[in-house]
Amino acid sequence: MKLVIANKNYSSWSLRAWLALRAVGQPFEEVRVLLDQPDTHERILEHSPSGRVPCLIDDTLTVWDSLAIIETLAERFPQLWPATAAVRAHARAVSAEMHSGFPALRSQMPMNIRRQMPGRGRTPASEADIARVIAIWLDCRQRYGRFGPYLFGSFTAADAMFAPVCFRFQTYGVEPSGEAGAYLATMLAHPAMREWQTAALAESEIVPSDELPD
């Protein structure tokens, strides 16, 4: 398999698909296309018909969009979703909500692992998004915490979908308490998350559109 991604410091969508592949132990080639370069769009189009990343390539199969990649992987690796139907439906619902929602959190607190900006981007709209994220985390942990430290016990696609939020919380100094805070700490300590963060910190490229003004 081959996974086309963008800068690790900024690309939240790339992180989700990358984590899913790491979670199932599937070997893959990583192709990184830098954002905000004169040839960025053309280089992505060489792999992805949407002109966006991530894009998974498996022989003749091409899948773009992070959630579609996760669902495709789950057909081969069903452990990406919880084992029981009702819990699986819950995991899919919160993952889809993350995929399509939280516009203020995305725009006002862009993923930027290299920066530390506590308190930045905190507006009524982003605070509402933060509150909803924390509510999801608390609900999942209260229901399934006895099965393990992640949202649904063991690590699933839902954790991959919320992983960029964990880096955002770290960057902007969002510190949930209780079970939500414990979950955040667990995610930030995950070996694959630490691997991604190390690579992001080693990057030097700047994408102005993803940098909040000083």
Image: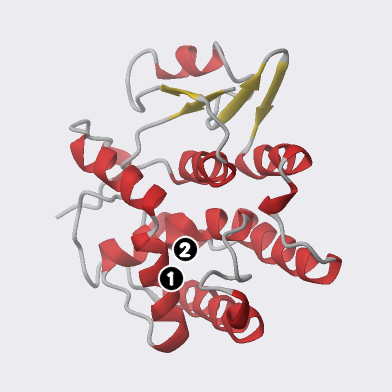
Compared with residue 113, is residue 6 higher up or lower down, i.e. above or below? Answer: above
205 sits to left or right of 128: left
Q: Amino acid at mark 1?
A: Ser
According to the image, label 2 marks what residue? 104
For the residues labelled 1 and 2, the Cα–Cα distance comes to 5 Å
Crowding at dot 1, Cα within 10 Å, few <14 / some 14-19 / many 20+, comes out as some
Residue 82 in percent (x, y) is at 72, 62
- Determine the secondary structure under disc 2: helix
Residue 106 in percent (x, y) is at 45, 56
Residue 126 shows which numbered tag? 1
N-terminal of the pair, mark 1 or mark 2, is 2
Compared with residue 148, is residue 24 higher up or lower down, i.e. above or below? Answer: above
> Looking at the rendering, in which quadrant would you find the C terminus?
bottom left
Q: Nearer the viewer, residue 213 or 90?
A: 90
Which picture quadrant has residue 119? bottom left
212 sits to left or right of 145: left
117 sits to left or right of 6: left
- Determine the secondary structure under disc 1: helix
Residue at the right extreme? 85
Query: Looking at the image, do the residues carrying marks 1 and 2 touch, with CB atoms under 8 Å apart?
Result: yes
> Looking at the rendering, in which quadrant would you find the N terminus?
top right
Residue 36 shows which numbered tag? none
Image point (32%, 78%), residue name: 175
Compared with residue 10, is residue 94 higher up or lower down, i.e. above or below? Answer: below
Q: Nearer the viewer, residue 173 or 15?
A: 15
Crowding at dot 2, Cα within 10 Å, few <14 / some 14-19 / many 20+, comes out as some
